[in-house]
Image (tube, rainbow, N blue to C red):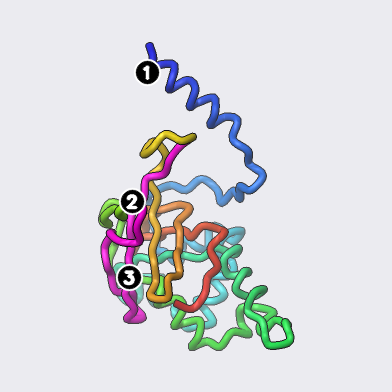
Amino acid sequence: MKNISLVLTIAALMACCDKDNYIDSGIHERKHDCTIWEYFQTDHANWDSLIVMIRHASMIKYFDGTNKDEITIFAPTNHSINQYLFQTLDDNGERFYEKVTEIPANECREMLLSYMMHGKKFLQDFDHEVKGTLTGGTIVQALSGIDLRVYRITSTFYDIPDLGAEKLAFQAPDDYIGTVASCNIEMNNGVVHSLDATCMFTKL
């Protein structure tokens, strides 16, 4: 009986969650019978800026199956890329770039490669972080050559440990922490882990 009461209480709390800071990026099917490039075209509300960046960096072949290699990408949504545009400032506090195509193409390429890995990598392929530390997880090499510490974390739900959703995150060499909003979105030629809207897409 106590277990039933706990479940009902949690369900009620979930229904009452404050959504003021929630950005709806849609409901994601886990398996899509298409390429990653085709998948991005289906959701311009989230991926428009990324599509422009991939074209600008001449990197479509990584995503449309031309390379024949499977990849995994921590993919930045429009929110993440817009943060980079608005927060990359000169000494006078003016924006360096007004739009994605003003960012040097080689810079776009280097940034994108730092968020990409060889092969299909799912949440369950990575180890858990050691709680209360910045250790644990799995070290993987991005296509840019840098090492990323990719790890799983189990969140607390209303002060109840390990009852919340299991999430995916990664740490870059300069201690940049990237968190994932939606993971394990699989296409024929790879996997997309969508970055949380609060994460700024930047150089790693």
- Amino acid type for the residue under numbered disc 3: Met
> Would residue 31 be found to the left or right of residue 90 on screen?
left
Q: Quadrant of residue 99?
A: bottom right
- Along the polypeptide, which appears first: circle 3 or circle 1? 1
- Amino acid type for the residue under numbered disc 1: Asn
Residue at 36%, 81% (x, y): give it.
144
Q: Quadrant of residue 56?
A: bottom right
User: Distance from label 2 to label 1 (Cα)?
Assistant: 26 Å
Marks 3, 1: nearer the viewer: 1
Q: Quadrant of residue 173?
A: bottom left
Residue receiving disc 3: 117
Give residue 147's mark.
none
Using the image, determine if residue 91 lies above or below residue 132. Answer: below
> Would residue 95 be found to the left or right of residue 61 on screen?
right
**Secondary structure at numbered mark 3:** strand
Name the residue at the front extreme. 132
Residue receiving disc 1: 3
**Secondary structure at numbered mark 1:** helix
**Secondary structure at numbered mark 2:** loop
Check residue 152 for magenta coloring: yes
Find the magenta span and give its range.
132-157
> Would residue 11 be found to the left or right of residue 18 on screen?
left
Q: Quadrant of the C terminus?
A: bottom left
User: Distance from label 3 to label 2 (Cα)?
Assistant: 25 Å
Using the image, determine if residue 96 lies above or below residue 24. Answer: below
Residue receiving disc 2: 131
